[in-house]
Image (tube, helix red, strand yellow):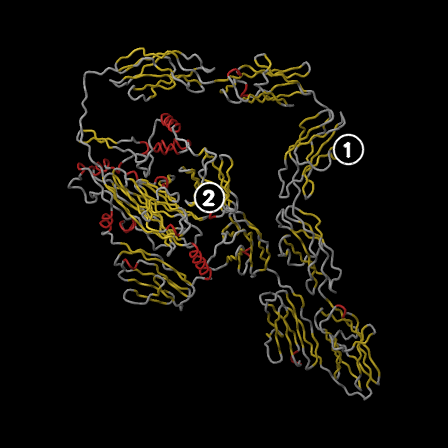
Amino acid sequence: WISAFIKKPKCQTAEVGATVVFEAETEKADARVRWQRDAKDITASDKYVISAEGNKHSLTINNVAPEDAAGYAIIAGASKVKFELKITEAEGKAPAKTAAKAPAKETPSDAVPPADAPPAAPADPLFTFCLIAGLPESHQPDTRQDLTGLFTEKPQSGEVNVGGNITFVAKVCGESLLKKPTIRWFKGKWMDLASKSGKHLQLKEHYDRNTKIYTFEMHIIAAKANFAGGYRCEVTSRDKFDSCNFELTVHAEDAHYALWLMVSPCSSTDGGEDSGELDFSALLKKRSLFLLSDHSMVQVSTEPDVDVWEILHNAPPSEYEKIAFQYGITDLRGMLKRLKKMKKEEKKSAAFLKKLDPAYQIEKGHKIKMQIEVANPDAEVKWLKNGQEIQPTGRYIFESIGNKRFLTINNCSLADDAAYTCMVGDEKSFTELFVKEPPVLIVRNLEDQMVMKGERVEFECEVSEEGAQVKWEKDGVELTRDESFKYRFKKDGCKHVLIINEATKEDSGHYRVKTNGGQSLAELLVQEKDLEVYQSIADLTVKAKDQAVFKCEVSDENVKGVWYKNGVEVKADARTHITHIGRIHKLTIDDVRPEDEGDYTFVPEGYAFNLSAKLNFLEVKIDYVPRQDPPKIHLDCMGKTADSTILVVAGNKLRLDVPITGDPAPTVVWTKAEKVVTDSGGRVHVESTKGHCIFTIEGAERQDEGVYSVIVRNPAGEDTADINVKVVDVPDPPQAPRILSVGEDSCVVQWDPPLFDGGQPVLGYVLERKKKKSYRWMRLNFDPYKETTYEAKRMIEGMAYEMRVYAVNAIGMSRPSAASEPFVPVAPSSEPIGLCVDDISDTTISLKWRTPEKVGSAGIDGYGVEYCKEGTDEWIPAFEGLTERTSVIIRDLPTGERMQFRVRAFNVAGPSPPATLPQAITIREIMQRPKIWIPRNLRQTLIKKVGETVNLVIPFQGKPRPKLTWTKNGEPLDPKQVSVRNSDTDSILFIRKTERKDSGVYELQVQIENVEDKASVTIQIVDLPGAPQNLKVADVWGFNVALEWKLPKDNGNCDIIGYTIQKADKKTMEWYTVFEQYRRTNCVVSDLIMGNEYIFRVFSMNMVGLSTEPCLSKDSAYIQKTGIMYKPPSYKDHDFSEAPKFTRPLVNRSVISGYNATLSCSVRGIPKPKITWYKNKMDISNEAKYRMFSEQGVLTLEIRKPCPFDGGVYTCKAVNASGEDTVECKLEVRSLTLRAKDDKSLLKMQFNL
């Protein structure tokens, strides 16, 4: 399919009252076009002006209004182009309109802007800034130019005042995309804004099903000066990618407005409240902000709305540092201690010993088993699915074993993807089951194809799932349905077909089909075959009024041709007939005349050769003879000899027309091998006319070959002539080919010539191959191959193939031979590498090697090891068969003999080249002195904590095998505490659970006869230290306290590296760390608060950690108050309370059954109101099917996989001490069955289009 348009109209954006012109150009000048709006034809009027000049067409819309914003289209023939018109308000009206929509916020009474403030700084700083409508014309998106990539509208650079709002819009056309594109917003080069969504940044997206346009928006709210800079938008869809850069400029206001903005609540820098910051500097600011105003200090509280400790309590330990950084927590040690205390206080379940896991995942069709443990073995449990109780069936099986309860779901389907609850009394345990669909597999692979240029190609595969998505590639590039419909994709159930119309040489290559579970590869070869002449035209000699037939046969039945006589084209008339049936071209001339004599030529169209023959006119002269004229046979048309040979192609008609004379008219008898041939009404016809005897055989066969004799007799005598008839045919098929050898991607095939060559010499052979499991044969050569041995290449290693052969002579091609035995192209592997001697004794030798570098797809069946005596070539197998290991021990070798060894790798292709030792080896054990090799890490003292495992591996050498002895501090080891295992090369000392008494010097002695070697390892087992001793308050002065203490009695078997000193006020008894890793045994604690009484404690620390118990001071220290008394000023608290009010109501929704649905609204109120959700005025707060979320005033109700019964009126109620407010909406749940039918019908309609 080719588009009828060479220029298409583009989407445009215009202001109200403007004039818009859409232009298009068609391929043909006389093409008729139609303009449409929302699928309805547009007629010419004052509003719409339609014009056409040649191939140029235009649609003019005058005085556009907001209702003119719609989808338009132009249609020419079968081509349809869609475009959009967008309407924006005039530039001067945009700020006023958007400012009216901004929500009002309270401002402090002392922050009123001055009277001379510029009009650009309104009292309310949160005014909405519309990018497209409010920007100058130079900054508006130029939708008239062609957009490349995925974007149909790119975000444009914009400007905004401090405290203002701005929106960036990006649009992507989803008409050609298989799934939803992924979009990412960045600031600068690397900062991903997805994690910054919050108070100042919101990312939104929606999809228009009518226009199939994805719209992505980035809203920046209450902009700050540090928001300015470069931004980037990236969109990705499968292997397609597009990006766009744009700038944001933030203009600062006057000093009074900046001061008001700083003290307003929107200037909070708390990580929990202001997670929408676009830079990391806000995370390093203090948790409170101080402003100097009227010579007094004003503190603005920035406490977060969320419970940070609850977030930390539910988060994994790996996320603690990230959360602390986000919410400004700097005392990480205190945070960890508080979390530890919180987890100790966690209340245990009275009914459950072990609850369900948070989630389970299972593949479709498999079985899942959920397990809980209850405290009471006699307790009854209930299992619920999406809040509905499950009844035991063949698929749902309940089991009870002791205090364990099991729920087994057999043959899981997508319907089992739900939330499950186990109830024991009033306690519940929740989990979710996710059913994963199995990957789509390719059950029938693509097949290699070889076609001629211009032919149609179909690649077909079969996958395991109906309706699965597949991806087609050519040489690694994805194929798409382009405008010329070069490639077509057909789907029939599990079958997927790639169709290539009219293949060209450029279509040759490797085609691949991919699914999410596999892929298949096939090769396409497109060749241009030379035209072959199977039968050429022959010279003819005919008599007057006879019929002359010129006939030829070529290899391509689609080739046409032209007949010429003496260089002039022959035209068909009443006597001349030109026919073309299949591969046969005929020129028939009836009632031949003398002027028909000449040279006739057949020229195939598109080829630079011709076929020529001559037509001779035989003029029969009848002379006067006496009445008694003996018969005479005239055979002057074949070299003027009576003995001649006539060739006829099997299946063709044989017609022997012999001129005879004689008076009276002679009788004619035809014989073959002394047998008279008669007209029996079958294939043979004998006819005699005046001056001629005609012998005809319809459809000549091989048995018709031989010498035919014609005998003419009359009373005056007789005459005889012999005519040798030879029937030629295509040869017999050759014998089944034989595979002589195979290579990595090739094979050598050989065959015997056919038993019968068809009466013509065999010109060559044509070979074909196919994959064993395929039915499609692929031709390997088009020109006849003259030899009987051929090397076939370009095969896939590891794939089974079959071969067959055709014989070709001048008549044509034989039937195919029988297929060869299946074979697999593989190559022998390379030789094993790294062959060396591992060990040797008086009668044995140990060899080892590594796997060959090149193995191939056939793998390695095993290795063969051979040896021979030095100086001989007789290699003896070391053992029967093959070994799969890469090491071997050869036994029973003659002592003192010099031997050579080699190793070969074997696979189905045969043995690899051998790997041989560089020189012969003498079979004799070599004495080796004992030597212990102490690892580097054991040359120093090995320090382990109490309870840890000790595993020492000490390698050594020595032959014959030495005697090993372990001692500890000169004494034998205790076998109950220490285990020892010895081998030929190392000794292992193992202590499963260390104790303090295991410290000491461990010595290993290796002895061979009178020669020995020793090595020692020092092990130190360390533990936590004891508490310091005698902590006392040495002195108290001012705000300082001097402390002293003594060393602990037990240092944990290692040095004390410091002390941790803590203080606590007697009123609160909360401990705070004063010093950490303090090395002295005395210190001074400063900066104490007067009027408070303190106690102190000290922990000792070694390399293991802090002591378990501290040393507490026996007496306390009281910090005396001074005479000056501070009287703090009193302030009247301001009442910030506010009744709940919904700022955004619930919206009526219609959803599809089986897909999760959410209802959202927003509320404000001080103090934070309590939220309750109702369905049809029934409280659903405790229903498992519903999940409620509340974040920053945004309320969300999630309904898991709703069914039609979940439709109804949903109400959200907010209550606090100041009042209450409610909002409600209607939810309609549509059945999925009808929608599926609609989708199928829509897909069917799109496919037909």
Count up the numbered dots: 2
Query: Does residue 1030 sit above or below 1220 in this rendering?
Result: above
Give the residue drawn at x 36%, y 25%. Answer: 334
User: Considering only order in the chain, which callout, 1 or 2, is on the residue closer to the N terminus?
Assistant: 2
Q: Where is residue 750 in the image (x, y as percent from the top left)?
A: 71, 53
Q: Residues within 10 Å of mark 2 (few under 14, many from 20)?
A: some
Residue density around tag 1, few if under 14, some if 14–19, many if 20 or more, within 10 Å:
few
Residue 919 falls in image quadrant: top right
Mark 2 highlights which residue? 434
Q: Which of 1013 and 436 is in front in this view?
A: 436
**Which is more toward the observer, 88 or 1191?**
1191
Where residue 39 appears, as percent x and y from the top left, is 36, 62
Callout 1 secondary element = loop
1226 or 1156: nearer the viewer: 1226
- Please name the residue shown 40% across and 67% down the image: 29
Q: Name the residue under label 1.
A: 872
Is 890 displayed left or right of 1 in the figure? Answer: right
Three-letter amino acid code of the residue under disc 2: Phe
State the image quarter where residue 145 is shown: bottom left
Judge left or right: residue 279 versus residue 926.
left
Residue 569 - label: none
Residue flagged by tag 1: what amino acid is it?
Thr
> Is 164 left or right of 628, judged from the image as shown?
left
